[in-house]
Amino acid sequence: MDITSAEFIISNTDVRKCPAGTLPEYAFIGRSNVGKSSLINMLTGRKGLAMTSATPGKTMLINHFLINKSWYIVDLPGYGYAKRGMKGQEQIQRIIESYILQREQMTNLFVLIDSRLAPQPIDLEFIEWLGEHGVPFAIVFTKSDKLKGGKLNINISQYLRQLQEQWEELPPYFITSSENRMGREELLNYIESINKEMNSK
Protein backbone atom coordinates (compact mmCIF):
# COMPACT_ATOMS: atom_id res chain seq x y z
CA MET A 1 0.00 0.00 0.00
CA ASP A 2 1.24 3.47 -0.90
CA ILE A 3 0.39 6.31 1.45
CA THR A 4 -0.29 9.36 -0.69
CA SER A 5 -1.85 11.57 1.99
CA ALA A 6 -1.86 11.72 5.78
CA GLU A 7 -3.46 14.58 7.66
CA PHE A 8 -4.22 15.31 11.29
CA ILE A 9 -7.98 15.72 11.79
CA ILE A 10 -8.87 16.07 15.48
CA SER A 11 -7.76 15.44 19.08
CA ASN A 12 -10.18 14.93 21.93
CA THR A 13 -10.85 13.05 25.16
CA ASP A 14 -14.46 12.16 24.38
CA VAL A 15 -15.27 9.23 22.10
CA ARG A 16 -18.55 10.96 21.13
CA LYS A 17 -16.56 13.76 19.48
CA CYS A 18 -14.57 11.43 17.22
CA PRO A 19 -15.11 11.97 13.45
CA ALA A 20 -18.52 11.05 12.06
CA GLY A 21 -18.86 8.62 9.17
CA THR A 22 -18.04 4.96 8.66
CA LEU A 23 -14.37 4.99 7.58
CA PRO A 24 -12.38 2.18 9.23
CA GLU A 25 -10.08 3.13 12.10
CA TYR A 26 -6.82 1.42 13.05
CA ALA A 27 -5.86 2.37 16.58
CA PHE A 28 -2.36 2.19 18.06
CA ILE A 29 -1.78 1.74 21.77
CA GLY A 30 1.02 0.70 24.11
CA ARG A 31 2.82 1.54 27.30
CA SER A 32 4.32 4.99 27.54
CA ASN A 33 7.59 5.35 25.65
CA VAL A 34 7.05 2.24 23.50
CA GLY A 35 7.71 4.22 20.31
CA LYS A 36 4.12 4.81 19.17
CA SER A 37 4.53 8.25 17.60
CA SER A 38 7.72 7.19 15.82
CA LEU A 39 5.94 4.13 14.42
CA ILE A 40 3.00 6.21 13.14
CA ASN A 41 5.41 8.67 11.52
CA MET A 42 7.35 5.80 9.94
CA LEU A 43 4.19 4.13 8.59
CA THR A 44 2.86 7.33 7.06
CA GLY A 45 6.24 8.61 5.88
CA ARG A 46 5.47 11.97 7.57
CA LYS A 47 8.17 12.84 10.08
CA GLY A 48 6.24 15.16 12.37
CA LEU A 49 2.69 13.82 11.92
CA ALA A 50 2.45 12.28 15.41
CA MET A 51 4.47 14.27 17.92
CA THR A 52 7.31 12.26 19.46
CA SER A 53 8.30 13.23 22.94
CA ALA A 54 11.20 12.38 25.21
CA THR A 55 8.74 12.61 28.10
CA PRO A 56 6.71 9.41 28.43
CA GLY A 57 2.98 9.75 28.98
CA LYS A 58 2.51 12.87 26.86
CA THR A 59 -0.36 11.61 24.68
CA MET A 60 -3.50 12.08 26.77
CA LEU A 61 -5.85 12.44 23.83
CA ILE A 62 -7.44 10.37 21.08
CA ASN A 63 -5.75 11.65 17.90
CA HIS A 64 -7.24 10.96 14.46
CA PHE A 65 -5.15 11.03 11.26
CA LEU A 66 -6.91 10.58 7.92
CA ILE A 67 -4.89 8.35 5.57
CA ASN A 68 -5.42 8.35 1.78
CA LYS A 69 -8.80 10.01 2.46
CA SER A 70 -10.16 6.51 3.09
CA TRP A 71 -9.19 5.28 6.58
CA TYR A 72 -7.87 6.57 9.91
CA ILE A 73 -4.87 5.92 12.08
CA VAL A 74 -5.87 6.62 15.68
CA ASP A 75 -3.19 7.41 18.24
CA LEU A 76 -4.46 6.44 21.70
CA PRO A 77 -2.99 7.49 25.06
CA GLY A 78 -0.25 5.25 26.45
CA TYR A 79 -1.18 3.18 29.47
CA GLY A 80 0.70 2.47 32.67
CA TYR A 81 2.65 5.67 33.19
CA ALA A 82 3.18 5.69 36.97
CA LYS A 83 4.17 9.36 37.37
CA ARG A 84 0.76 10.46 36.15
CA GLY A 85 -0.79 9.82 39.56
CA MET A 86 -3.86 7.75 40.34
CA LYS A 87 -6.41 10.27 39.11
CA GLY A 88 -4.57 10.82 35.83
CA GLN A 89 -4.25 7.08 35.25
CA GLU A 90 -7.97 6.54 35.88
CA GLN A 91 -8.82 9.31 33.43
CA ILE A 92 -6.59 7.77 30.75
CA GLN A 93 -8.09 4.34 31.40
CA ARG A 94 -11.58 5.79 30.92
CA ILE A 95 -10.60 7.41 27.60
CA ILE A 96 -8.97 4.19 26.34
CA GLU A 97 -11.80 1.89 27.43
CA SER A 98 -14.57 4.10 26.07
CA TYR A 99 -12.88 4.33 22.67
CA ILE A 100 -12.03 0.61 22.40
CA LEU A 101 -15.41 -0.66 23.60
CA GLN A 102 -17.77 1.98 22.15
CA ARG A 103 -16.23 3.10 18.86
CA GLU A 104 -17.94 1.06 16.13
CA GLN A 105 -15.53 2.30 13.45
CA MET A 106 -12.54 0.79 15.26
CA THR A 107 -11.55 -2.02 12.93
CA ASN A 108 -8.35 -3.24 14.55
CA LEU A 109 -6.21 -2.34 17.54
CA PHE A 110 -2.43 -2.56 17.28
CA VAL A 111 -0.85 -3.25 20.68
CA LEU A 112 2.76 -2.04 20.73
CA ILE A 113 5.28 -4.03 22.75
CA ASP A 114 8.93 -3.02 23.33
CA SER A 115 10.87 -5.97 21.90
CA ARG A 116 13.83 -5.27 24.22
CA LEU A 117 11.93 -6.18 27.38
CA ALA A 118 10.84 -9.42 28.95
CA PRO A 119 7.03 -9.90 28.96
CA GLN A 120 5.53 -7.19 31.19
CA PRO A 121 2.49 -8.01 33.38
CA ILE A 122 0.76 -4.74 32.40
CA ASP A 123 0.89 -5.67 28.69
CA LEU A 124 -0.22 -9.24 29.28
CA GLU A 125 -3.14 -8.05 31.43
CA PHE A 126 -4.18 -5.54 28.77
CA ILE A 127 -4.07 -8.23 26.05
CA GLU A 128 -6.14 -10.53 28.27
CA TRP A 129 -8.69 -7.72 28.75
CA LEU A 130 -8.95 -7.34 24.95
CA GLY A 131 -9.59 -11.08 24.65
CA GLU A 132 -12.32 -10.97 27.29
CA HIS A 133 -14.08 -8.20 25.37
CA GLY A 134 -13.61 -9.77 21.94
CA VAL A 135 -11.60 -6.83 20.59
CA PRO A 136 -9.81 -7.54 17.27
CA PHE A 137 -6.12 -6.80 17.73
CA ALA A 138 -2.60 -7.50 16.50
CA ILE A 139 0.72 -7.16 18.32
CA VAL A 140 3.49 -4.88 17.05
CA PHE A 141 6.95 -5.46 18.49
CA THR A 142 8.83 -2.13 18.33
CA LYS A 143 12.50 -1.07 18.51
CA SER A 144 13.76 -4.30 16.91
CA ASP A 145 16.89 -2.50 15.64
CA LYS A 146 18.06 -2.04 19.24
CA LEU A 147 18.78 -5.76 19.74
CA LYS A 148 21.82 -7.60 18.43
CA GLY A 149 22.19 -11.22 17.30
CA GLY A 150 19.51 -13.69 18.23
CA LYS A 151 18.27 -11.68 21.24
CA LEU A 152 15.29 -10.33 19.28
CA ASN A 153 14.07 -13.82 18.34
CA ILE A 154 14.61 -15.06 21.89
CA ASN A 155 12.55 -12.18 23.36
CA ILE A 156 9.72 -12.56 20.87
CA SER A 157 9.60 -16.36 21.26
CA GLN A 158 9.44 -15.90 25.02
CA TYR A 159 6.56 -13.47 24.61
CA LEU A 160 4.61 -15.74 22.27
CA ARG A 161 5.17 -18.72 24.58
CA GLN A 162 3.72 -16.76 27.47
CA LEU A 163 0.70 -15.75 25.37
CA GLN A 164 0.14 -19.36 24.32
CA GLU A 165 -0.50 -20.24 27.95
CA GLN A 166 -3.75 -18.24 27.72
CA TRP A 167 -4.55 -18.16 24.00
CA GLU A 168 -5.46 -21.14 21.85
CA GLU A 169 -4.64 -19.11 18.76
CA LEU A 170 -2.03 -16.38 18.75
CA PRO A 171 -2.99 -12.96 17.40
CA PRO A 172 -1.20 -11.69 14.27
CA TYR A 173 2.12 -10.04 15.14
CA PHE A 174 4.61 -7.77 13.42
CA ILE A 175 8.25 -6.94 14.13
CA THR A 176 9.08 -3.30 13.44
CA SER A 177 11.74 -0.63 13.67
CA SER A 178 11.03 3.05 13.14
CA GLU A 179 14.74 3.55 12.48
CA ASN A 180 15.16 1.20 9.52
CA ARG A 181 11.47 0.93 8.50
CA MET A 182 11.38 -2.79 9.22
CA GLY A 183 7.82 -4.17 9.20
CA ARG A 184 6.34 -1.14 7.44
CA GLU A 185 5.24 -3.00 4.32
CA GLU A 186 3.82 -5.96 6.27
CA LEU A 187 1.78 -3.71 8.55
CA LEU A 188 0.39 -1.58 5.73
CA ASN A 189 -0.42 -4.69 3.66
CA TYR A 190 -2.28 -6.13 6.65
CA ILE A 191 -4.36 -2.94 6.94
CA GLU A 192 -4.98 -2.95 3.19
CA SER A 193 -6.16 -6.56 3.24
CA ILE A 194 -8.70 -5.77 6.00
CA ASN A 195 -9.90 -2.70 4.08
CA LYS A 196 -10.37 -4.77 0.91
CA GLU A 197 -12.25 -7.45 2.82
CA MET A 198 -14.58 -4.80 4.29
CA ASN A 199 -15.16 -3.18 0.91
CA SER A 200 -16.11 -6.50 -0.66
CA LYS A 201 -18.90 -7.09 1.85
Image (cartoon, rainbow, N blue to C red):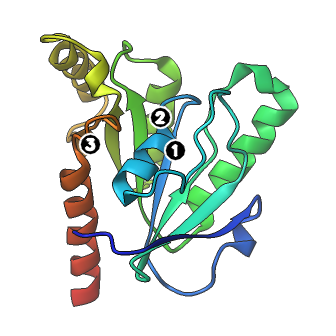
102 relative to 91 in the view: left or right: left
Residue at the image point whose x is 72% and y is 20% from the top: 82
CA gap, disc 2 and disc 3: 13 Å
- For the residue marked with disc 3, what is the amino acid? Arg
Q: Residues within 10 Å of mark 1 (few under 14, many from 20)?
A: many
Find numbered disc 3 in the image and state the secondary structure of the residue it sits on: loop
Residue receiving disc 1: 37
Residue receiving disc 2: 35
Q: Quadrant of residue 147?
A: top left
- For the residue marked with disc 2, what is the amino acid? Gly
Task: Please tell me whether mark 2 or mark 3 is closer to you in this view.
Answer: 3
64 relative to 28 in the view: left or right: right
Residue 149 vs 84, above or below: the answer is: above
Find numbered disc 1 in the image and state the secondary structure of the residue it sits on: helix
Residue 145 vs 30, above or below: the answer is: above
58 relative to 133 in the view: left or right: right
- Residue 65 image position (x, y, % from top left): 53, 67
Residue receiving disc 3: 181
33 relative to 1 in the view: left or right: right
